[in-house]
Each structure stands twice: as C-alpha cells, then as structure tokens.
C-alpha cells in the first residue's frame, strides 16, 4: 500500500513538472519569437 501511494505521488509530481516545463517553454518561445539576437532577447526579458 505504501509503495503504491509513493508511486502514485511520484507519477503525479512527474506530470506536474512536465506541465510546468511545457508552460515555461511556451512562454519563452512566445517571448523570443520576434528576436534575432541574444541581446534583443535579453532586452525583452
């Protein structure tokens, strides 16, 4: 029972981390979509 609960919690945490990473990647791509250089990207942020 404890192992099943641990596995469920680990799977849920993995899912949430992946969702968070996907959100960060989306925000970054939208922020950088109109920049051509690292300097422009830095100025955007």
Image (cartoon, helix red, strand yellow):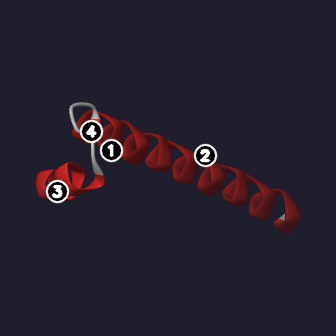
- At numbered mark 4, what does the secondary structure look like: helix, strand or loop? loop
- Quote the CA–CA distance across marks 1 and 2: 20 Å
Q: Mark 2 points at which residue?
A: 15
Residue bearing mark 1: 28
User: Circle 2 — which element?
Assistant: helix
**Residue found at the far left of this picture:** 43
Residue 19 is left or right of residue 30, and the answer is right
What residue do we see at 42% from left, 43% from top? 25
Q: Which of marks 4 and 3 is nearer the N terminus?
A: 4
Real-space CA distance between mark 3 and mark 1, rounded to the nearest whole angstrom: 10 Å
Residue receiving disc 3: 45
Q: Mark 4 points at which residue?
A: 36
Label 2 or label 3, whichever comes before in sequence order: 2
Q: What element carries label 3?
A: loop
| Residue 16, percent from left and from top | 53, 49
Mark 3 or mark 1, earlier in chain: 1
Instruction: Between residue 18 and residue 44, name the one nearer to us.
Output: 44
Comparing 23 with 29, the one in front is 29
State the SS at label 1. Answer: helix
**CB under 8 Å between discs 3 and 1:** no
For label 2, the crowd category at 10 Å Cα-Cα, with few meaning under 14, some 14 to 19 and many 20 or more, is few
Q: Which one is closest to the eye, mark 4 or mark 3?
A: 4
> Is 16 located above or below residue 30 in the figure?
below
Which residue occupies the foreground of this view, 35 or 19? 35
Residue 14 in picture, x, y percent from top left = 64, 53
Vertical order, 2 against 19 (above or below):
below
Decide which of 3, 29 is in the foreground and name it.
29
- Give coordinates of residue 32: x percent, y percent: 27, 40
């Amino acid at each position: 029972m404890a192992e099943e609960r641990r596995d469920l919690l680990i799977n849920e945490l993995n899912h949430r981390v992946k969702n968070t990473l996907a959100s960060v990647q989306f925000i970054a791509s939208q922020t950088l979509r109109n920049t051509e250089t690292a300097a422009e990207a830095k100025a955007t942020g």
